[in-house]
Image (spheres, rainbow, N blue to C red):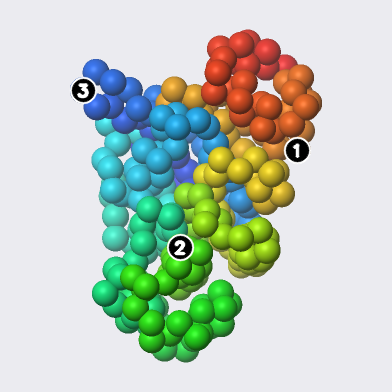
Amino acid sequence: MLTPLAPQQVLSVRGLRKMYGANVAVDDVSFDVNSNEIVGLLGPNGAGKTTTINMVLGVLEPSAGDIAIAGVELARDRSVALGSTNFAAVYAQLPGNLTLYQNLRVFGLIYGVKNLSARIDEVLDEFDLATFRDTKCGVLSSGEQTRVSLAKAMLNRPRLLLLDEPTASLDPSTAQDVRARIREFAARGSSGVLWTSHNMYEVQEVCDRVLFLSRGKILLEGDPRRLPEEHGKASLEDLFIAIAREPLSVETSQP
């Protein structure tokens, strides 16, 4: 059983485990995301990042462990907990046969967004999408669809925002603008962000703290600007590569 969240916490994960038969995808993972914080969940492909996010989103049921979102245990009150979250990923595009406005309206109704029409106009302006309001999402470019996914993710002003490679398919200028908007979102109010990315430059620029997953376990945690030096690496990308290739050597070198 989870203990009550501290006032600043928007996500608490304790002893999370996911097994597929005899294979362990996530193994006893515990971490928090606090208000006004962006936490990077990093690791090579197959490390357990997407499985962890899918358990937080309620898409997968954990084999063991507990998740609380904005003080509500996911297993006890799923609809209330998930009502405080939202999600964006390049592989989770909105239905292509609906216009942008229709998609946002459907998701706004699902999340029970108040003053929905006005809120849709706000996110359309925020992500420079007003000109595509009546365009079917299926004909938008990959970069435009990424911005649409982010607009949907912000629609209900979530306490916990989960982002999986959120700036993929964006040109450098637009990606920089989106990063700034997400930092602004995390800085105001009482929300937190859990962010996965393979772009270590982006992670170093955006994240306050990072968690490195390897083989389903958290191997390292800390400030992305300090971790490389602490482990004898020149950059966060060098540290990432070392974890991907030789996780045991990195683990034994921890200070």
Mark 2 and mark 1 lie on one chain; the one further toward the N terminus is 2
Q: Nearer the viewer, residue 93 or 70?
A: 93
Label ID, residue 142: 2
**Residue found 36% across the figure and 57% down from its top:** 92
Q: Where does the image place residue 37, in percent across and percent down from the top left?
A: 63, 52
As helix, strand or loop, the secondary structure at mark 3 comes to loop
Image-based side of 88 in relation to 110, left or right:
right
Q: Which residue is mark 3?
A: 21
Label ID, residue 31: none
Q: Which residue is mark 1?
A: 225
**Residue found 38% across the figure and 82% down from its top:** 135
Residue 66 at least partly seen: no
- Is there CB contact under 8 Å for labels 3 and 1? no
Q: Where does the image place residue 252, in percent across and percent down from the top left?
A: 63, 10
The part of the image, by quadrant, that contains residue 128 is bottom right
Mark 3 and mark 1 lie on one chain; the one further toward the N terminus is 3
**For the residue marked with disc 3, what is the amino acid?**
Gly
Q: What quarter of the picture does the N terminus occupy?
A: top left
Q: Nearer the viewer, residue 46 or 79?
A: 46
As helix, strand or loop, the secondary structure at mark 1 comes to loop
